[in-house]
Image: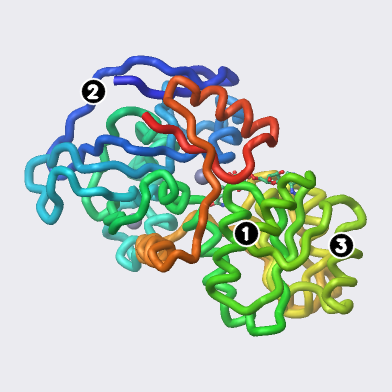
């Protein structure tokens, strides 16, 4: 089968032919219908050899949907042909975090050598994907596979980041979304669907800000050194009760800290390497700073349920599998508006 692989440190992703995989005992083989292109893949492909925790080559793709093609020995509860979304942050399934559905925070994954598909295990950018356990599948329930595939990460990650702050997101509160790309443009829609907050979106180009407005941002601000002052003004000097930073670079993290209201949450999702020092008087009093990772199994089911209400419209650009390297080039250059999706 064809697969999109990251094959050597610093190299570009390549379309190669690999043997068709088979489902072992307890596993599920999917015929992949769509796979999303996440900026985290670029972060992985930028890592030096000593930072990579798994061997190459790696078949990319940690956002996947497909139809069940075969069931490994002992698998029940699924039938060939079922349309499913893949829960990506695989864990052991048995530790206290996994028992709570939070496999993204599995306490034993590293020790047991368990990796998400596309981030260590063979991923979804291929004609077939082996899923290690049926508990990592959620029925699509009639959702369009191409529009739904980004929800497995670009939806789930912001959903988790927003849900944990919901008690602060009362009507009249303001939320700043920094970086309105794949994750950010879904975050804006989640905020509009789940709360009555005022959404202020920051990005670096007019095109991205136009998409932010289209998907529900009340205000848009160019992300430069004047952005924090602009947000302060838009919030009557108070600042935002939640700042979601989908860039996470030093300048955006600085902006995030500067616009955080008293008792706000600053949630750094992007892998840009920025750090926000916290000490008395800075940022504002009692600001909580955190950097979450992906989301839980139940949260993925919730995001898909929300999508079934019609509240989420993911903007997708589709690419044939042979054009996957081009999709990565365009993402790297900041040219994707919304999410790129590969159709194997
Ligand atoms: P993306 O490229 O689709 O979106 C990033 C957006 O940020 C783009 O619209 C870009 O124009 C904008 N941007 C760049 N510099 C900016 C700046 N200085 N100010 C404001 N906006 C700026 O990327 P994505 O796939 O949405 O991923 C976003 C980030 O989240 C990446 O760093 C990715 O690695 C990370 N991520 C983290 C998790 C997690 O679990 N923590 C999960 C998925 C992705
Ligand atoms: Zn991702
Ligand atoms: Zn676990």
Quarter that holds the N terminus:
top left
Q: Are marks 2 and 1 in contact (CB under 8 Å)?
A: no
Lower sequence index among marks 2 and 3: 2
Q: Residues within 10 Å of mark 3 (few under 14, many from 20)?
A: many
Residue plotted at (11% across, 48% down) = 75
Distance (Cα) linking label 2 and label 3: 51 Å
The residue wearing badge 3 is 228
Q: On the rendered structure, is 310 left or right of 273?
A: left
The residue wearing badge 1 is 215
Distance (Cα) linking label 2 and label 1: 39 Å
Task: Point out the frontmost of discs 2 and 1.
Answer: 1
Q: Are marks 1 and 3 in contact (CB under 8 Å)?
A: no
Q: Residues within 10 Å of mark 2 (few under 14, many from 20)?
A: few
Residue plotted at (41% across, 68% down) = 309
Whether residue 97 can be seen here: no
Residue plotted at (43% across, 41% down) = 62
Quarter that holds the C terminus:
top left
Q: How is the image coloured?
A: rainbow
Image location (x, y in percent) of residue 168: 63, 80
Image location (x, y in percent) of residue 288: 68, 71
Question: Who is closer to the viewer here, 155 or 148?
Answer: 148
The residue wearing badge 2 is 20
Q: On the rendered structure, is 84 left or right of 303?
A: left
Question: Who is closer to the viewer here, 257 or 334?
Answer: 334
């Amino acid at each position: 089968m064809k697969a999109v692989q990251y094959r050597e440190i610093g190299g570009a992703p390549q379309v190669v032919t690999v043997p068709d995989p088979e489902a072992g005992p307890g596993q599920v083989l999917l015929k992949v219908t769509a796979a999303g292109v996440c900026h985290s893949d670029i972060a992985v492909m930028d890592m030096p050899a000593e930072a990579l925790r798994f061997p190459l080559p790696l078949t990319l793709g940690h956002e996947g949907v497909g139809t069940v093609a075969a069931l490994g020995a002992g698998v029940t509860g699924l039938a060939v042909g079922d349309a499913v979304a893949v829960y990506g942050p695989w864990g052991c399934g048995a530790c206290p975090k996994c028992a709570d559905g939070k496999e993204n925070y599995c306490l034993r994954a590293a020790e047991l050598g368990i990796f998400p598909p596309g981030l260590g295990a063979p991923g979804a950018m291929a004609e077939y994907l082996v899923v290690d356990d049926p508990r990592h599948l959620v029925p699509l329930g009639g959702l369009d596979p191409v529009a739904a595939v980004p929800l497995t990460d670009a939806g789930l990650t912001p959903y988790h980041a927003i849900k944990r702050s919901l008690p602060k997101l009362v009507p009249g509160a303001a939320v700043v979304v920094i970086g309105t790309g794949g994750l950010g443009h879904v975050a804006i829609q989640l905020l509009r669907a789940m709360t009555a907050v005022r959404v202020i979106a920051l990005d670096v180009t007019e095109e991205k800000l136009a998409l932010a407005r289209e998907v529900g941002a009340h205000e848009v601000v160019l992300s430069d050194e004047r952005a924090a002052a602009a947000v302060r003004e838009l919030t009557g000097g108070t600042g935002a009760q939640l700042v979601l930073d989908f860039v996470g670079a030093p300048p955006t993290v600085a902006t995030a800290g500067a616009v955080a209201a008293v008792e706000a949450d600053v949630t750094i999702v992007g892998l840009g390497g920025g750090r926000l020092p916290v000490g008395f008087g800075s940022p504002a009093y009692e600001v909580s700073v955190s950097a979450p990772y992906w989301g839980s199994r139940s949260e993925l089911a919730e995001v898909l349920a929300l999508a079934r209400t019609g509240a989420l419209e993911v903007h997708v650009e589709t690419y044939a599998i042979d054009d996957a390297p081009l999709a990565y080039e365009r993402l790297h250059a900041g040219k994707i508006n919304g999410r790129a999706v590969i159709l194997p």
